Amino acid sequence: MGSSSMAPHTWDGMIECWLKDSASADAGHSDFWVASPKGMFYLLRGHAEDCLRGREPGTVLDVSLPAWRVGECLLHAQRMATALGDPLSEILFQVVWYGLANRTLVSIGDRRFMTDDDICVEPTVASPPCRVPAKTISDTLPEIVGQATGPLYAAFNFFEPPASLFSEEMKRMRSGRP
């Protein structure tokens, strides 16, 4: 696998990788992941918003980024199920967001109108465990992402994003447009 400090390696019967030495060695780009031979995966990623110039770390959460990150993970899970030879499998996942207390929900780049009064008081929010057939992820991605991120958005002063946020952001994500 090479000698790079970022190359995946075995650890306790698992494969793990910490992208700590990337060109953007900040919390939003220093992913740590673990994969088990049984097809179980864990990803830890910092808040990209904490790495933006002109923003104090720990003060904002972009309204679109959680949807993008959950969507990316789900599409990856679908590809992994196919690559592992089991496209008919079910994907069981849960998302947990840490470090949320006192963050304001904003729109980085002002793509969406936000009032700046949606503030989270909870330090941590978890989605309910979700189970979806791998083969349906691609076709139902906006709905699945909406369900998984619902508790996160609700923690920001009961914020309820329009369904169009998920369909529009998943389309943007898939086209590679930031």
Image: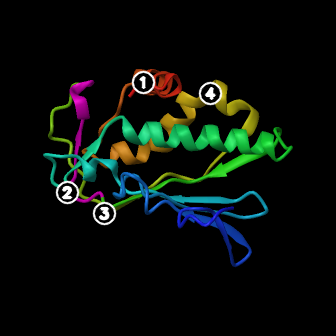
Residue pointed to by mark 3: 123
Q: In which quarter of the image is residue 62?
A: top left
Q: Are marks 2 and 3 in contact (CB under 8 Å)?
A: no
Give whichever of 91, 38 is nearer the camera.
38
Residue pointed to by mark 2: 102
Residue 140 — which label? 4
Q: Distance between the residues labelled 1 and 4?
A: 20 Å
Task: Count residues near mark 1 (Cα–Cα under 10 Å), then give few for <14, some for 14-19, many for 20+.
Answer: few
Q: How far apart are marks 3 and 4 (CA)?
A: 30 Å
Q: Which amino acid does label 1 sit on?
A: Arg
Tell me what residue is drawn at x 45 percent, y 23 percent: 172
Give whichever of 72, 89 is nearer the camera.
72
**Which mark lies nearer to you, 1 or 3?**
1
Q: What residue type is labelled 4?
A: Thr
Q: How far apart are marks 1 and 3 (CA)?
A: 31 Å
Give whichever of 122, 110 is nearer the camera.
110
Residue 177 — which label? 1
Q: Which amino acid does label 2 sit on?
A: Asn
Task: Count residues near mark 3 (Cα–Cα under 10 Å), then give few for <14, some for 14-19, many for 20+.
Answer: few
Label count reads: 4
Q: In this picture, which residue range is highlighted in magenta?
A: 100-112
